Amino acid sequence: MAALPEKVSQAWENREGPVIFSTVDGEGIPNAIYATCVSKFSEDTIVVANNYFSKTLKNILAGSKGSMLFMTKEGVSYQIKGRIEYYEEGVIFDDMKAWNPARLPGHGAAALKVEEVYTGANKLLD
């Protein structure tokens, strides 16, 4: 499993606004959502709280890979791609419940496992 390059890890800490989290269905139709409840679990895993997933959850459970796009306060964008694991219990789920706002349901934790990282067209991770 790959880890975020140091530059991207630092950029993550300097991100602004929601991320865009994308999945695809079994026919290859993309689905993208804005996600505000996100956190870096480790250098190889970014977690999105499932507060109100519908198509996104269906796609994840069907085996979709995913991507996450975020922007820094300076306007530099980064995209992380990889497989998605879904948790309704365990360490990653418990961690999500600790940072997800209590007023939100936090049904599960979608963990994007880092495989590829880009800034613009430049691939930062092989």
Image (tube, rainbow, N blue to C red):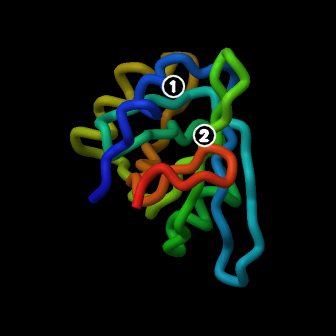
Q: Nearer the viewer, residue 116 or 86?
A: 116
Give how far apart the Cα atoms at labels 2 and 1 are.
8 Å
Q: Residue at x 64, y 61 (%)?
A: 23
Q: Residue at x 31, y 29 (%)?
A: 95
In the displayed image of the protein, which residue is found farthest to the front? 122
Tell me the amino acid under the disc marked 1.
Ala
Image quadrant for the N terminus?
bottom left
Density class for disc 1 (Cα within 10 Å; few <14, some 14-19, many ≥20) is: some
In what element is the residue under mark 1?
A: helix
User: Is 50 situated above or below 105?
Assistant: below
User: Is 43 situated above or below 31?
Assistant: above
Residue 82 location (% of width, % of height): 47, 60
Residue 109 location (% of width, % of height): 43, 43
Image quadrant for the C terminus?
bottom left
User: Is 8 situated above or below 121?
Assistant: above
Residue, disc 2: 78
Relative to 75, is 111 on the left or the right? left
**Disc nearer the start of the sequence (2/1):** 1
Mark 2 in CB contact with mark 1 (< 8 angstroms): yes
Numbered label attached to residue 11: 1
Numbered label attached to residue 82: none
Q: Nearer the viewer, residue 78 or 39?
A: 78
Residue 83 location (% of width, % of height): 44, 63
Residue 119 location (% of width, % of height): 61, 44
In the displayed image of the protein, which residue is found farthest to the bottom? 27
Q: Residue at x 45, y 44 (%)?
A: 108
Relative to 46, is 26 on the left or the right? right
Density class for disc 2 (Cα within 10 Å; few <14, some 14-19, many ≥20) is: many
Tell me the amino acid under the disc marked 2.
Tyr
